[in-house]
């Protein structure tokens, strides 16, 4: 890609972002203007406007970068080795036991310090 194409893309990207801003503004103002209409119609209109704005955003350079990042993240999630049900249960139980032990230690420390303070204060 040469610098001329990048420059033209940047100019068009600004226009695309302006159009997206107008679409979002129309959605917000239209939703309050048509507040007397059925909620279903307003939600459908907002979904259509969001879809159009999203499509326009995906045509920009930043939108394409975001889409590529999303696809790569999705691929990474597919490569993750997820724990089995037994591993998850064991890990959860270990965490619960550790939390219980720490809670009991803090309760004991709090009781001890409370007893000391009440002895000093009278």
Image (spheres, rainbow, N blue to C red):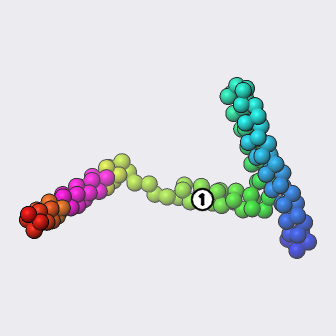
Question: Which residue is rendered at x = 88% and y = 74% of the image?
Answer: 3
Determine which quarter of the picture holds residue 8: bottom right
Question: Which residue is rendered at x = 63% and y = 60% of the image?
Answer: 72
Which contiguous range is marked in magenta? 92-108
Q: Is residue 77 left or right of residue 31?
A: left
Q: Is 5 situated above or below 16?
A: below
Q: Is residue 108 visible to us here?
A: no
Q: Is residue 41 left or right of residue 102?
A: right
Question: Which residue is rendered at x = 85% and y = 65% of the image?
Answer: 10
Question: Which residue is rendered at x = 40% and y = 54% of the image?
Answer: 83
Q: Is residue 58 left or right of residue 91?
A: right
Q: Position of residue 15 (x, y in %)?
A: 87, 57
Q: Main secondary structure of the magenta part?
A: helix
Q: Position of residue 71 (x, y in %)?
A: 65, 56
Which residue lies under the disc numbered 1?
73
Q: Is 4 situated above or below 14?
A: below
Q: Name the quarter where the N terminus is drawn.
A: bottom right
Q: Position of residue 53 (x, y in %)?
A: 77, 47
């Amino acid at each position: 890609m040469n610098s001329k194409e990048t420059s033209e893309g940047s100019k068009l990207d600004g226009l695309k972002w302006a159009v997206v801003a107008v679409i979002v503004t129309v959605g917000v103002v239209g939703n309050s203007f048509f507040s007397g209409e059925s909620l279903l119609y307003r939600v459908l209109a907002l979904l259509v406007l969001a879809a159009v704005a999203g499509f326009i955003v995906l045509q920009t350079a930043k939108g394409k970068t975001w889409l590529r990042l999303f696809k790569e993240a999705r691929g990474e999630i597919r490569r993750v080795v997820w724990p089995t049900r037994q591993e998850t249960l064991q890990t959860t139980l270990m965490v619960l036991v550790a939390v219980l032990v720490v809670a009991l230690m803090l309760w004991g420390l709090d009781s001890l310090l409370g007893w000391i303070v009440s002895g000093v204060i009278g």
